[in-house]
Image: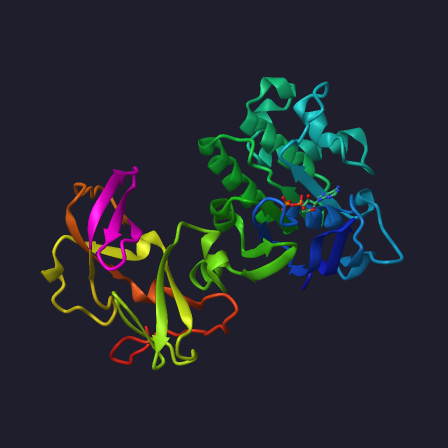
Amino acid sequence: MTRLALDGLLKSYGDTLAVRDVSLDIAPGEVVCLLGPSGCGKSTTLRIAAGVERQSGGRVLIDGDVVSDAERHEPPEKRSIGLMFQDFALFPHLRVLDNVAFGLTGHNRGERMRIAGEYLDRVDMADHAEKYPHELSGGEQQRVALARALAPKPRVMLMDEPFSGLDNRLRDEVRDAALSVLKQEEAAVLLVTHDPEEALRMADRIALMRDGKIEQIGAPYHIYNNPKDRAAAAFFSDLNVIHGVVRSRQTDTPFGLFLTPGLVDDADVEIIVRPQHLRIDLDEGQRPESSARTGVAAPGTVQRARFMGSESLIEVTMDHDGSVLRATVPGVFTPATGERVWLSLKRESCHLFPCAAQSKVRSPFVHEDGTPP
Ligand code: ADP
């Protein structure tokens, strides 16, 4: 069942095509995050879904009914949507309870107050009902804004960077509270963010946007582990890039051989590996098995090692080409600058892509002994 459907949305501003053929279905109770760099069209897509912006092409449907297309355009207040932005602007002259009751039409006053109280309770703010917004912290105000958006029981919640005004510690707390209330309410949620951690934490599905288009969509685990290209991988973490050239359907690297049967000779390839998927050993002989899972260890020299709290970051200058690779390992591991180390790759976590303009290969990884990863 689809609650919110965006169907082939287009939006141009003069010569700028801000949204290019965006289609997306969101089920009741599902949270979909639009994730992408600034200017890629996330907010425009959200504003079109809300009805505060009119698309140049395509349709918006709620519960299967067209609310906007070339002929018709229902205004936001007719769409059963809740809106939440970073700048959530509670009414300063109204008590918290009245702020939440404000959008509740079609009820008598007593009923409005009862519903508002219920939603304040849901976001753990019932004790603050009589206060004014300026008497609350940023996180508390955000909870009230969430209660206000949800109290009219919208079928669709549209949220644009709603937590970005909060400091780190508060943000986690408010995000978790928001997620649990949103899930109970069964609204379809479209949440815009540029923060990959927020998307991973909140989303049932992440839609990666670039240049006005959805480049890839899927569950967080899937998107993180199966990026469609280098840029999609780079949304979520630093990347190490190891270059190779195809010879006889194999790509030879200092970390061992990768079988690349779909690529022609002389094709340039990039092997992408996240810092946490590099393994560091202080001694080449520590892994005598030189296993098929990790391939060959390549030597290098520690350039810098830093303790980052829950993990350590080690930058290593590689012997084979002088490139610097970055590895993160859990806990405290800070070898001295100049120390010799051996790096190997967790092969099942590597991604191999032909360089630009060359055809793409899916699942090219096979270990040297021919077994799949
Ligand atoms: P994001 O939310 O991903 O940062 P936006 O949807 O705000 O991106 O913007 C997408 C593109 O559309 C940008 O190039 C932006 O400059 C342009 N844009 C957005 N709103 C307007 C507008 N009202 N007038 C002209 N250009 C706009």
State whether residue 163 is above or below residue 254: above
Front in this rendered view, residue 123 or 204? 204
State whether residue 298 is above or below residue 159: below
Q: Position of residue 325 (x, y in %)?
A: 30, 52
Tell me what residue is drawn at x 75 percent, y 57 percent: 10
Taking the image as shown, residue 263 lies to the left or right of residue 189, namely left
Colour scheme: rainbow
Camera sees residue 118: no
State whether residue 95 is above or below residue 255: above
Tell me what residue is drawn at x 58 percent, y 43 percent: 181
Q: Position of residue 13 (x, y in %)?
A: 77, 48
Camera sees residue 217: yes
Taking the image as shown, residue 109 lies to the left or right of residue 122, namely right
Magenta region: 300-327
* Extreme residue toward the right, this view: 71
Taking the image as shown, residue 360 lies to the left or right of residue 316, namely right
Q: Position of residue 133 (x, y in %)?
A: 64, 21
